[in-house]
Image (tube, rainbow, N blue to C red):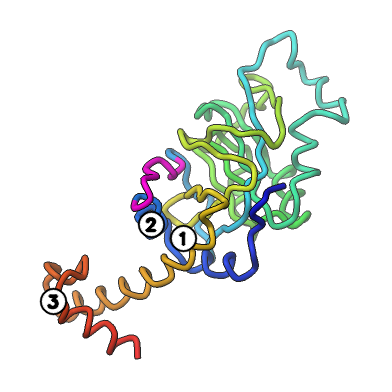
Amino acid sequence: MTDYPLSDETRAKFKKISTASIATALYKRGLRNQFIQGVRPVAPKDENMVGQAFTLRYIPAREDRNPLTVFRDPDHPQRVAIETCPPGHVLVMDARKDSRAATAGSILVTRLALRGAAGIVSDGGYRDCDSIGKLDMPAYCANPSAPTNLTLHEALDINVPIACGDAAVFPGDVLVGDKDGVMVVPAHLADEIAEECTGMESYEDFVLEQVLDGAGIIGLYPGTKDENLTKYNEWRK
C-alpha cells in the first residue's frame, strides 16, 4: 500500500490532535492546501478519525454507461472499493465536489464499518445520513443526497491519486478528521507531524488556561516572551 505504514503509536497521537494544529504544522513546511474543503461530519464523534487513504475516483456519469443494471456486475468499482478497503484505512471518494447525487448510502457504509474501516470521506453526498451518523465509524461528506450516484457519477478508479474537496489525496496519505473537518497528511510526514502537534496541543491547553485567568495573548500566543515559556515549562511539570 505505502512505503510509510501508519504505526499504532502515531495513530494514537493523531487521535488527540486537532485539524487546526495539523494545518499549522503542515503550513510550517510549506503545505497550504491539505484541508478537504466543503466536507463536514455526518454526525460528530468523540474520537478523531485516523487512517490511511484508500481512494475511489468518480467521473461524470454518461447515460449509456450507467443504467441501474450496472450494479449486477460483480466488478463494479463502487462495490469492489467497499469490499477491498483494508481495515484501519479511510475510504476517500472524489465526486468532483458534486453532492447532487449520493456516492454511498447506509448499507454500503455499514458494510465498510463492519469490515473494520477507520472512516469514509466524500466531497459528494450520501444517502441515509441519519443511519450513517448512528454508526460508530466516522463519516464525512458535503451534503445529504437522495438520488443514486448513477444519475451523476460513474465510479471508475480504485486506489489512485484523487482530488477530494480541492485537496490532493494519494493512497497511503494519513487522513485525520475531527469535528471541524478532515486534514490530509502526506504519509512520509505523519510521524513528525504527530510528534510536533502533540507538543503544540499541550502548549495551547496551557494558553487557554492563562486566557481564562485573564492573561493577554501578546507574547503568550505565540509564545514569544521567555517568561511565558518558563511558566509553561513549570505548568507541564
C-beta proximity under 8 Å, tags 2 and 1: yes
Element type at mark 2? helix
In this image, 50 relative to 194: left or right? right
Question: CA separation, marks 3 and 2?
Answer: 25 Å
Amino acid carrying label 1: it is Ile
Amino acid carrying label 2: it is Ala
> Residue 139: image x %, image y %?
58, 49
Mark 1 Cα shell of 10 Å, populated few (<14), some (14-19), many (≥20): many
- Find residue 25 and name its label: 2
Q: In this view, does 27 lie above or below 38?
A: below
Q: Which quarter of the picture shows residue 237?
A: bottom left
Which residue is under mark 1? 193
Please give the name of the residue rendered at 15% of the width and 68% of the height, measured from the top-left corner.
217
Which residue is under mark 3? 215
Pick whichever, 104 or 96, lies toward us: 96
Pick whichever, 16 or 235, lies toward us: 235
State the extent of the magenta-drawn residues as a range. Answer: 28-36
